Image: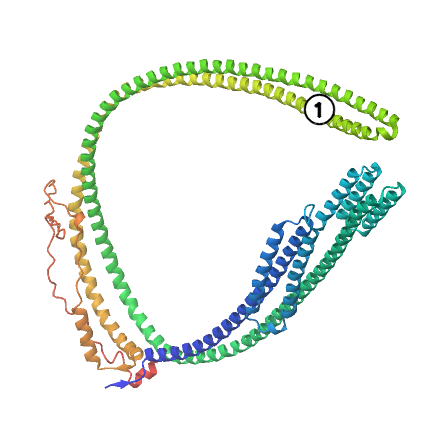
Amino acid sequence: MKQTKLSMNKKTILSFLGIFAMFGIGLAISIYSYYGLVESLKNTVQNDLKMKDSMRTFATNLGEQISHEKEFIISQDPAGVKRFLELAKINEETYTNMKKIDVDYSNEIIWDELYKEFKEHSKNFGNTRSTLKIEGDSKSGLRGELRSYAHDIEKKIKKYDLNPSFMISLLNLRRHEKDFLLRRTKSYVDKAKTESEKIKKELIARKYKQYVYSDVSKSVNDYIRTFDKLYSNQLLLEKYSAIAVKGTKNIFEIIQKNIELIDRKTTERIEESTVLEDKISFFIPILFAVIAAFAYGFQYNFSKSIKKIIVLSERLRDSSQVTEKSSTNMSMASAKVSSSVTQQASAIQETVATLNEITAMVNKSVENAKVSSQKADESQRVALEGKKAVNDMVEAIGQINGNNEDIMKEMNRNNEEIVKIVDVINEISEKTKVINDIVFQTKLLSFNASVEAARAGEHGKGFAVVAEEVGNLAQMSGNAALEIEELLGGSIKKVQSIVDETQVNVKRLISEAQTSITKGVDVSENCGKILDSVVDNVDAVTKMMTEISTASQEQAEGINNISDAMNELDEVTHTNSSIAQETSGFAESLSEQTSILNGIVEELESEVLGKIQNLSADRDRLVDSISSAPVETYSAPEHKVVEDFPVFDSTPAPQVVKDKPAKFVAKSAPVVEDMGFDDPVLEVDSDEYPSEDDARFDKAV
């Protein structure tokens, strides 16, 4: 009779497939939503940060441009212009790259006004450069013209032999020019004009001829007119500077507004992502609640099948307890067999190991005797060579000591030469004092000349100027002489310091060298003593050779241990024979319990596999599978197989051949014959275990 139903395996698979499908859908939705949110926020924030960093880079480069612009205005260094133009080009590229950044609020960024102010700033710098070029320096531009007109006035004063007061007025004009270039204020322009009018009035007051007045006045007017142009150019430069300040301020304000816009947009996006994240967090628990409901349905369906299996497992447990007792007895018997075999294998291993050790010890003893003799001769030779090397080292140390004394003499000679240099410097210092005396006399003569020039009145003014210049030269010579004297004083102190320091260092080095030499001599003496002890040790090695014979006696005792181990092998073999008979009886008991377990297994197959087949056919198939199972045998590994084992007493030696299982044949061991046991699997009584189509099955469940 056959009955077909859905197997437990299929029920489990279908239930798990349903749960996994729902779980996969929910997980996919969650992952897709989460990664979509993260990717969107990531791209947005990256673009925002990139835009913000670009704005800051633009502002930083602009700040450097302003710095180089100021540097150029102050020093007119062409490197400042070059760096300004490089930064302008970099900012041009930065502006282009910023406009390419993909942000949805690009139309809200102040692009056109930023670019316009930036270009105006660069254009204004070009105007500033042109203005500074017009101003020029002492050799070009308006400043060069001023200098040229001043020289022209000076030449005409000398040409017409004008009063020295005109030269003083010219110097005042040049001073006002210098003050204007330093402070850039109109007051110095006015002072220059006042001084020029003074020159014209003085020309009239002193009643110089008309052509002299016209010629000198023309040069003075040209000078003042150029001065006015320079001042106008300065006003234009200040205008461009004010425009630059205002433009850069506007640019920084625009950049700040753009950065505030970026920050505001970034904050809005983060808030939007937070709202979306809350929605995802709300729907995910609902989705997993549905999955939990499906899991509960699966658990309910699965538990019904589990209840049937529990009833059968209780019956199976009762039968297994009986089987456990039989298996325990068999396990104990097997343990005895295992213990005996272990003892037997251990004894064999000990025997083989002992023989190997004996052989190795004998060979090693012979080799050690030869090597020891060779080492003794070699050690004596090395000790003699070492002693000779120590003597050579002592001689070398003596030579080093002599070299140190030569070095000391050479250093003393060098110190004497340096002292001579100090004497030369002192002589130079004395000569410098003579120069100071000459300077004093020159100043005195200059003063006397000035007095005489003052007495001479108008005719002595030219000589007064010469006397003043001579006094200035004398003052400069005096200052130079003082500086030379100070340098010579410092040189003397420094050279003396070097001499003292060199003497101290040389004495210290010689002292250290003497200490090292003394230490080297002590070490060499210790080496000689050690080498003497090495010779004594060589004599001791010879005495140790006599101890080798004692080791040979201990080897003989090891051979006696081998004989005892082989006797134990014979006793263990007899024990294994009796244990094998006990194991045969336990196997018969286990075969009866196996037939009972067979019926329970068939009922479990009915529940798990989902069908009930013909019981007798199943039983025959199970019997065939058990009877055809391969019998496992143990074969000794190749590295543990022993041949030609010696025979002790009357016990036969084990016959062992390489590449074959080891077989130990004892003298009194009986041969285990076939006991005529039946097949261990018995038929199951259907009255004892009802099938699923029987009414008693439902009652049992």
Q: Nearer the viewer, residue 129 or 273?
A: 129
Q: Position of residue 380 (x, y in %)?
A: 28, 19
Q: Nearer the viewer, residue 583 or 97?
A: 97
Residue at the disc numbered 1:
481
Q: In the rendered view, tell whether residue 684 sits above or below residue 484.
A: below
Q: Position of residue 216 (x, y in %)?
A: 80, 45
Q: Position of residue 644 (x, y in %)?
A: 10, 43
Residue at x-position 76% and y-position 51%: 226
Q: Is residue 365 visible?
A: yes
> Which image quarter holds the N terminus?
bottom left
> Which image quarter holds the C terminus?
bottom left
Mark 1 is on which residue type?
A: Ala
Q: In the rendered view, tell whether residue 370 sits above or below residue 697.
A: above
Q: In the rendered view, tell whether residue 197 sits above or below residue 327.
A: above
Residue at x-position 22% and y-position 76%: 684
Q: Nearer the viewer, residue 309 or 534?
A: 534
- Bin the neighbour count of mark 1 within 10 Å (Cα to Cα): few under 14, some 14-19, many 20 and up: many
Q: Secondary structure at mark 1?
A: helix
Q: Position of residue 110 (x, y in %)?
A: 64, 70
Q: Is residue 693 visible?
A: no
- The answer to which quarter of the image holds residue 679 is bottom left
